[in-house]
Image (cartoon, rainbow, N blue to C red):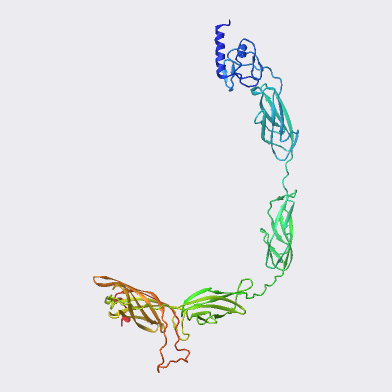
Amino acid sequence: MRPAKKSKDWIFLLTVFSALGVFCMVCGAGASNNFPSIYNSYFGTTANCSLCHSSIPALNSRGTTFLNAGGNTIAGWAAIKPADPTPPTVTITTPTSSPTYTASSSSLSIGGAASDNFTGPFGVTQVTWANSLGGAGTCSGTTSWSAGGISLSSGQNVITVTARDEAGNTGTDTLTVTYTPTPAPVLTTITVTPPSASIPQGSTQQFSAQAFDQNNDPISATFAWSSSSTTVASIDSLSGLATGVAAGSTTITATSAGINGTAGLTVTAPVPPPAPVLTSITVAPATASIAVGATQLFTATARDQNNNPMSATFTWSSSSTAVATINSSSGLATGVAAGSATITATSGTTSGTASLTVTALPEPPPPIPGTADLSVWVEKWFKVKMQNRGYYNEEENRLSNHRQRLSAFLKITAWDPENKILQATILGKGEEGKWSEPILLHYISGTNLKFLCWSQMTLAGDANFGFTAQIRGSKRRSELVGGVFTSVGGYHVETTEDDDEDGEDEDDDESSNKQPPAGWLKITGKLIAEEKVPADIKE
């Protein structure tokens, strides 16, 4: 019988190995089902791996180490690997399996495979490389390995790859790499584009250049431009933009680092442009709308065959003089009656048109009887501003387009409760001295302190204007202390001239019974104290 101590050790070994597993020192596989062989090894016999069937020599005594299936050490036991005199093999397959290779770059990547008669931890443990012209390193991987970024020198670089196994045996493979660095590019030729050109005097031509090296490959370069005859054409030395100066020929040269490229440039005498021909006429505004008696100024623009404006004299006409007339020279149209007319500007055989719509004047609102007592406004003064478009021209029987602005004073003088009329006077001073105009403010609707009224008044050369106004005021202790006067619509009222003094109509006189054209009027005012009215106005 074996000693009790040995029996205890065997039980310990079996317990540890059964818990952690045994690692085959040949194939690297776990041999957890190999306990009888391991047991026999303890007494000097051999153990057999149940997977690779390799014979493992006898175990050492205690105090050494042993690996389990996870690669971890187990205190107490170790296995002895048999002698391994066989070196591993290594083969280079990338970038080529040939023994020689020509590289186009100064950096090389290699790869391949390695093998050994043992596998696992006793097989190939490391693969390294070395360059005969300098440089060495360790490859990534073992049985399948690679290395990148290997620097090459000019000439033949002998790359030696060495595989090493656990026993220290080595195997090698070599690749001879020839590397010839590309020589630096040297500017050799310059090509100018276009190679030839022709421009009129005063015009420009853009030239460009391309530099090429000794291999006819394009390279970057900075060019200086010149012209062989600056009296024929000048050229910007940096941009290559040439300008024709006079008729003739010159050579355009692009220079860089002593190398020249040339092109030919011909400058021709300028060709006079064709004379402008009137092609179209545009009338502005294209459409317009005015009231009866109002005016609208039309303008025209002539354009040639290139759509460029050109000077021209226009004759103006209206397609319906019953609706609107137009001054044949100035283009000023006057509304005659409601309707539409086509306004035409003609020059030679070319014409342009616009549309003019004439609308009827609105009738002034009739007075509406009311119950308001407006006596509170009597003897009150307003400082007013009046604007009217144009003043009546008796010679031309029309209102001009000129706008008049007047400052004046309006005094309410009486209240007619029966007819609901406020009597008033507008007073002012002009270049010809003081003037006054009586007006009647016809009550329309509203209250004592806020009401509408309408009136008519004659201004600027007998132009008769009608308007509607709103008057608003405020009281304090039964006293009127504030107020404003605002016209909300003003227009010219057409009137027929009176018969002559003998009571006979002057039907044969062209100037009689003519209707002044329409215009507009706006009045705004503010109630003021009587003491603020100038004395010469009140006189």
* Horizontal arrangement in the rendering, residue 310 relative to residue 502 (left or right): right
- On screen, 43 above or below 121? above
* Horizontal arrangement in the rendering, residue 496 relative to residue 317 (left or right): left
Q: Give the x, y percent position of residue 366.
A: 36, 78
On the question of residue 199 being in view, the answer is: yes
* Horizontal arrangement in the rendering, residue 415 relative to residue 322 (left or right): left
50 or 277: nearer the viewer: 50
Please state, as top left, top right, bottom left or bottom right, where the C terminus lies in the image: bottom left
Taking the view exactly as shown, the residue that stands out farthest to the bottom is 502
145 or 199: nearer the viewer: 145
129 or 113: nearer the viewer: 113
Q: Quadrant of residue 34?
A: top right
Q: Give the x, y percent position of residue 189.
A: 74, 53
Q: Quadrant of residue 119?
A: top right
Taking the view exactly as shown, the residue that stands out farthest to the left is 477
On the question of residue 156 being in view, the answer is: no
71 or 64: nearer the viewer: 71
Q: Give the x, y percent position of residue 318.
A: 54, 80
- On screen, 218 above or below 269? above
Q: Give the x, y percent position of residue 8.
A: 54, 10
Please state, as top left, top right, bottom left or bottom right, where the N terminus lies in the image: top right
- On screen, 217 above or below 486? above
Q: Quadrant of residue 43?
A: top right
**Labels in figure, total:** 0
Taking the view exactly as shown, the residue that stands out farthest to the top is 1
- On screen, 190 above or below 445? above
